[in-house]
Image: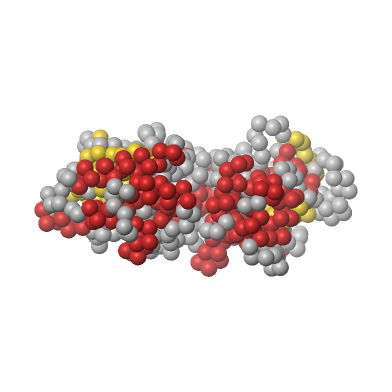
Amino acid sequence: MPRPKYQPLPTSTASIRMLTILPSRRFGGPVKANLIHVDLDQLDQAPFAFYEALSYTWGDPNLPRVPCKLNGHEHAITVNLELALKKLRGRTRKRYLWVDALCINQDDVIERASQVQIMRRIYESAEQVLVWLGGDADDSVDAIRLMERFTDADCPDDYVGISIRDNQDLAQWKAVAKFFDREWFRRVWIRQEVAVAKTIMVMCGKERIKWNTLSLACDILTSPEIGGDFDSVTGMVSNRGQGARWVVTIETLREVWAKDRGLNLELLLLHGRGTNATDARDRVYGLLGLADIADKLRVDYTVSPQEVFKRTMITLLNHQQDLNPLSGCQWRGYVAGLPSWAIDLNEDFEAMVLRPKEDGEQLYHASGEKSACFNFFEPGGLLRAQGFIFDTVHAIGRSFPPDDLGELRQSFENWVQLVQKTAALRSSGVADNELMQEFCRTLVADQDDRGDRATTAFFRPYFDGETLTTLPAKLAEMYEEETVGFSPRLYEVCSGRLMLGTSKGYIGVAGRACKPGDFICILLGAGVPFIVRSRSPEYILIGEAYIYGIMDGEAVKEFEGKSEMPSEICLC
């Protein structure tokens, strides 16, 4: 009589199930495995010398599942997992492997939550993390061999740059682009699984490649010299962007984790936005194990994704005691159960978040040295914060980029006209050269090509001798030709945004949801201004903004001179 597939795990210990894959001399033979209980705190007492953990994707949910034998019972698994297990099992020896789909009782939400809470420990305790990308397809063998070749120390430094621009070599670079278009690279969970791993082996069909080799290949493919060319190749095979950039991000997380053993949850959530998750709640839980405040947020699969997103923001704001995480909020319309001040992690960014830097340094200080003062009010999901309304959006320009890149010049002309009309609202005049400086700094949110605050020297090579009249043509020309410097920074800052002018004559950029009549709001304890919309007596948070001339506390000084601080802004 076979034992039950799942016996309850002890709740008083860090207990997990381990998959024992039984050997088979026939690759095509059915997968047979048993589950045993082990304690992560007592691995020296486990009936094995070491175990490995599998990092993979479950596969296409629309494909029929296939049977395997688990503790003597028939159990359905995905085609992709079956292929991985057949590839990994030994011919004569058992193999001990941790696989989420089999080692966690997926029908028990309480157990799921408890196991997810210790997921980081499971992967960092494994002797090796095995990455399974799927079977051979789209010339993946050629792609892996090419990456091994151009990362070899004997490969000429200019090989990739020459080859990737040679049409005769296009097929092999398309194979590399397709390799990085696999679903694994976009899965939210892989960030944690790889970041904490002792060692990593990447498998794709019959081929294997070391993680360090893959990471080096991605550094090369995303470098300023090569990145634009490889982006072009990627665009020929996918509309989802470069998967190689995800690898660079994951390796960064891996390096920071090795050094600090705890990452800022806000930055983790920003990194994870746009990744794939079968369960929306895993957009938080899949990254939580890496966070410096992992113990402050409890995994709970009994509540809605919106409730998870709201709880996460409350935890984050209370921990940081500032309002900087609100920069990640980008309003796209009402979502039931989700206040405007909580990041909707179901949606990818429309625009790059302006404020965060990887080293934690603050770029902007719109609220000066003022500290945050806020509280939450339930029911209603309200965030009450000290701050003030500084100005009103008077007019907006076209959103960027235009659907037709042939209209780039017209878009920049539209923005220049808006800037000139807005400047006319000021009580004192402004010289054209000063207005051009304001405009150029606004286009890049006053950031240089490294993401630091820009100096005058950064702009000089591009715009010496230019005027507001000639500037649109110059910007359009640079945008189409320049791969490093001003134009890439302009693209990062302005994509998904539009130019705005305020009633007081300020110019800035804000998200596409911004419209005339919205307000410019300063919240104490936040580095950037925000766009808010009245829903009396509360406000909807539309998103962050860059407003030239008030990014370093100037609005606070002006407000303090006219009124007693503070007032209260209630966000719904």
Q: Nearer the viewer, residue 571 or 293?
A: 571
Farthest residue, direction left: 562
Q: Nearer the viewer, residue 530 or 70?
A: 530
Q: Quadrant of the N terminus?
A: top right
| Quarter assignment of residue 549 | bottom left
Residue 381 horizontal/vertical position (percent): 33, 40
Q: Quadrant of the C terminus?
A: top left
Q: Residue at x 64, y 53 (%)?
A: 164
Q: Is residue 410 visible?
A: yes
Q: Is residue 119 visible?
A: no
The reply, left or right, for residue 474 in relation to residue 132 is left
What colour scheme has been applied to the protein in the rendered image?
secondary structure
Q: Residue at x 47, y 53 (%)?
A: 482
| Quarter assignment of residue 59 | top right
| Quarter assignment of residue 371 | bottom left
Residue 324 horizontal/vertical position (percent): 35, 54
Q: Residue at x 40, y 42 (%)?
A: 408
Q: Nearer the viewer, residue 27 or 485?
A: 485
The reply, left or right, for residue 551 in relation to residue 305 is left
Residue 559 horizontal/vertical position (percent): 15, 53
Residue 438 horizontal/vertical position (percent): 27, 54
